[in-house]
Image (cartoon, rainbow, N blue to C red):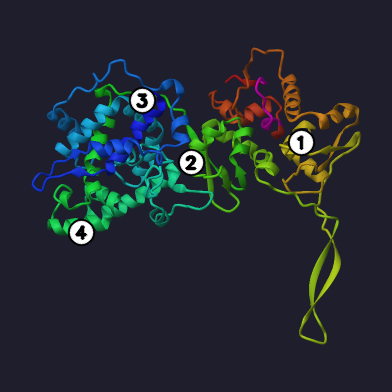
Amino acid sequence: MNKFLNLLILVSLTLITHLSFSQSATDTTTSVNLLEFKNAQANLDSLLNEWYVKNAIANDSIYRSSRGLEHYTKVADSIIIERLNKIPTSIQMSFNSDVRKWLDLYLKSGEYVMPTLLGLSQYYYPIFDEIFDANGIPLELKHLAVVESALNPQAVSPAGATGIWQFMFSTGKMYGLNINTLIDERKDPYTATLAAAKLFKELYRIYGDWMLAIAAYNCGPGNVTRALSRAGEGANYWDIYNFLPVETRGYIPAFVAMTYLMTYSNEHNFYPVKITLPMYSDTVIVTEKLHMKQVAEVLSLSLEELRDMNPQYKKDLIPGNTDKCYLRLPFQKANLFASLSDSIYHYKDSIYLNTVKVKTPTTVAATKYIASTSTSTYTEKTEKVEKEETPCDVGNLVGKTELIYTVKSGDTYGFIANWYNVSTTELKCWNNTTSNKLSIGDKIIVYVPTKKLTTYKTIDNLTFDQKQALTSDEIIKKSPTKLDETYIYYTIKSGDLISTIAAKYDGVTEADIKKLNAFTDSDVRRLQIGQVIKIKKK
């Protein structure tokens, strides 16, 4: 069975939580409608998408059992009841024939479904646990996300419910989720889980019973309240079972069955597949308009991985200039983003953000409105207003010659400063600007040592990669070659920062490393793979 079919089965199990059950007027047990189950398998396009199929699961980790269905040995009801009672939860995990039918269904299809769910849960469950614990929500409610969406943040139901927690548009807005042309926080595992926690707390406040709160999450508090009224005072979920909408009758049994199976997966020989999402990540705040391709290319991340970690951005565009936006990154890349943020924001911005730089002339025409002495009307008067010069200390230019550099695709002030071995502040001063904006074709003034004029002249004709390599070579050449046994020598690797290197050695601080290697702030930002630095032994 191929990967696509594996996930087809997985998502089908999500859909059948909303299918009808055949019922008898005198018998409250249910049976799975196999015909509807088959129909659901044929109509999964609304929940399947490129993110889920291509990226979530590592290609070499698709679970294939050579044991057939040997793992499906029917476990006695008494054992299941005993195991459910051992789950440390305040939710009453009742077991009956309804739960048994759901459990059997999951077990029979579980050879391909459960390893995928277990793999995804390793990434998403820690997020749910932290948020639910902080809000006083029973941690077992995290298993509802499996029933709701098969842990797929891109899931969209035929009715429009979206994300891991399947919020409708109006409900998402009600609980503070940002939904607009560029952002849909229903797809963000963090903000959506916060909203789900708020909703769960509100429903529990109404009913004082977690099973009723879960039922209300599925079908709305109005349906649950009407069912309670029909069942009589003091009724619980199972008392109102027959008065609930048909799809909600299977919701709680499916939740109990999935809670059991996710908790006791090892007892049924189910083990997680490898997933591509990083186990350790961090969040950075985006304060300007930013495209994911800018981040991916500067930080050497795959665009797909970045999308997987930030599914709330619908068009790869992060409107940090207008919205409060966060970006989730692999842990080491988050630190790197902080140190390279200026370069990232302006990397190929004219391409990815369609920005256009407007040159400000030395003198501009300004229109002032002045009151006429004879009437109460206003007349226009156009006059020349001198542009206020930006104060700038250009420093000592003795022994230096002016060069003109032409801005090309991908250039930023930070990159240009590194290539010419000057500071960004100097570069902006020489060009009388405080802006970070650059456009292709801009002419940038830079002062270089006259003795090295010929070398620096060649930079304007190099490709971007050649200029980056030139900078790297120069830095690596400065690495210590004579080893002193009184020091430890460390070779820079991909993703390294001074802070992360210092953390590897007890008693060593960032300041120690900077002082020992005579690093300036610019040197720290320009660490290169292969560069060797000294660490003082403690």
Q: Which amino acid is tagged 4?
A: Arg
Task: Name the mark on residue 311.
Answer: 2
* Residue 481, percent from left and from top: 72, 14
Looking at the rendered structure, the secondary structure element under dot 3 is loop
Quadrant of the snapshot with the N terminus: top left
Taking the image as shown, residue 356 lies to the left or right of residue 400, namely: left
Q: Against 80, is 149 above or below? A: below
Q: Mark 2, residues whose alpha carbon is within 10 Å: few (<14), some, or many (≥20)?
A: many
Q: Which residues are magenta?
A: 523-532
Q: Is residue 527 magenta?
A: yes
Q: Which amino acid is tagged 2?
A: Pro
Q: Mark 4, residues whose alpha carbon is within 10 Å: few (<14), some, or many (≥20)?
A: few
Which residue is tagged 3? Answer: 272
* Residue 440, percent from left and from top: 77, 41
Question: In terms of sequence position, does the residue under pointer 1 or pointer 4 come before the other?
Answer: 4
Q: Quadrant of residue 117?
A: top left
Please name the residue shown 41% across and 33% down the image. 123
Looking at the rendered structure, the secondary structure element under dot 2 is loop
Task: Name the mark on residue 226.
Answer: 4
Taking the image as shown, residue 513 lies to the left or right of residue 304, namely: right
Nearer the viewer's eye, disc 1 or disc 4? 4
Which residue is tagged 1? Answer: 417
Looking at the rendered structure, the secondary structure element under dot 4 is helix
Q: Which amino acid is tagged 3?
A: Pro
Q: Which amino acid is tagged 1?
A: Ala
* Number of numbered tags placed on the structure image: 4
Question: In terms of sequence position, does the residue under pointer 3 or pointer 4 come before the other?
Answer: 4
Taking the image as shown, residue 38 lies to the left or right of residue 307, namely: left
Residue furthest out toward the bottom: 374
